[in-house]
Image: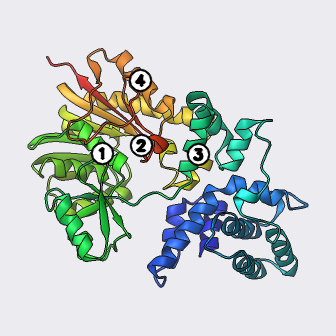
Amino acid sequence: MALQALLAVDESGAFANLSIARAPAASLSSADQALLVQLVYGTISMRLAIDFQLNARLRKPLETLPTAIRNVLRLGAYQIMYLAKVPPHAAVNEAVNLAHRFGHVGTAGLVNAVLRRLAPADLLAWPDEALDTVHYLAVRYSHPHFLVARYVRRLGLTETEELLRVNNLPPRFSIRVNATRADPPQLAARFLERGIVADAGKYVPEILYPMPTPLFTDELFTTGLYSVQGEASAMCAHFLSPKPRERVVDLCAAPGGKATHLAELMGDQGEVVAFDRNARRLKLVAENALRLGLKSVRPIHKAAEEAFGVTGAVEKVLLDAPCSGFGVLRHKPDLRWRHNEDSVRDLAVNQRQMIVSAAELVAPGGTLVYSVCTTEPEETTDVVAHLLALRTDFTAVKTRPLTLRRAPSAGDGLGYYVWPHRDQLDGFFIATLRRAGI
């Protein structure tokens, strides 16, 4: 199953999470499903490091091999290099069996010979750090060179290495308690009855970190007591500070995590108008609101630029814009290989257009929150500065919401950055912009 998922990513450009979802994993135990995710995500995340080691042991470049055999090698190498719980001989034997199925005797022999010469990552030779530090960091921690170079310029070598290391760690599973149906201590107690310990969130009061991961077939989930959401993502609704009976607009709302959070913070009183251009994903907004028992969420199938024609000016607007996703590489490992300098610039152009459209929706005295799950300047502070240069009636609000337990890492006055290595959360940028009153 792991190999099939990797082939879908490599051959057709499928997203890793969707390729796993399509795998026939229903018969697997929860432990085996977790291993499946770890194998696929880990192999994709560490691809550059794995390919470096494989190429050092191959007579021909790895890319000249058939796609299936290339990914058999990567899958076996990941287990040998990074998974201590899988014995190396077991990883080699499984890879050889797969090579027989997807290749022939010769390729099976190749796979066997190459993988037997591998060792755990900390025992292997890597590029010369003194000769080219960026190249060393990129290969050793398996991140694209252009992104590593960006981090080094902004953060320096020591902090960059720590960020890259953290990006390769498994993410903590977190949930958001539905404030209209429970409070965190109550839900934590009910989890404990099931043998699940739920730690409190560091920043957001309604976030819990349950361990082990609860089953989504359990009544606590099916009856809408909680949603799955990262703590950094959950900060966004607090920055908007929605109040009961207000009308709030969420642009790019699918799959509905932030829209439903806004509704919960409003006590499900008022209206959250949730726009998205993707009809299929917009259905998830409606489904999530229904499960959570929220009646104030109103999904609208329209792009952000068309929202004003539906709602007119409103008090509060959230724009969680499409972005490079470099802050959530632990959740979406394939994003590190899908972008380059050009795509970041293209995304920034779109983000500037979207924030200008979003500003048109904000009534005098109202608030616009702009957020992205990345930390790149073109997609963060530069976008905010672009709007402020065009709209002198908007100013950046530099104080954190009092409903948060503490502030994340501060930005440069235009917004807050959340960094994986500093805040132990996903990477995010959140800016609050206030429009002057009449």
Q: Please say if 89 is above or below 234.
A: below
Q: Which mark is residue 423?
A: 2
Spatial separation of the CA atoms under disc 4 and disc 1: 20 Å
Q: Is residue 299 visible?
A: no
Q: Which residue is mark 3?
A: 164
- Residue type pointed to by label 2: Asp
Identify the image's colour scheme: rainbow, by chain, secondary structure or one colour: rainbow
Q: Nearer the viewer, residue 278 or 112?
A: 112
Drawn side of residue 80 relative to residue 367, left or right: right
- x then y, percent, for residue 373: 43, 43
The answer to which of marks 2 and 4 sits earlier in the sequence is 4
- x then y, percent, for residue 329: 52, 50
Q: Classify 10 Å Cα crowding around label 1: few (below 14), some (14-19), many (20 and above).
A: some
Q: Classify 10 Å Cα crowding around label 3: few (below 14), some (14-19), many (20 and above).
A: many
Residue 62 lies in quadrant = bottom right
Give yes or no for contact between labels 1 and 2 (Cβ–Cβ under 8 Å).
Answer: yes
Residue 416 lies in quadrant = top left
Q: Residue at x 38, y 69 (%)?
A: 213
- x then y, percent, for residue 123: 75, 59
Q: Which mark is residue 323?
A: none
Spatial separation of the CA atoms under disc 2 and disc 3: 14 Å
Q: Which residue is mark 4?
A: 412
- Residue type pointed to by label 1: Tyr
The answer to which of marks 3 and 4 sits earlier in the sequence is 3
The answer to which of marks 4 and 1 sits earlier in the sequence is 1
Q: Which residue is mark 1?
A: 203
Q: Residue furthest right?
A: 59
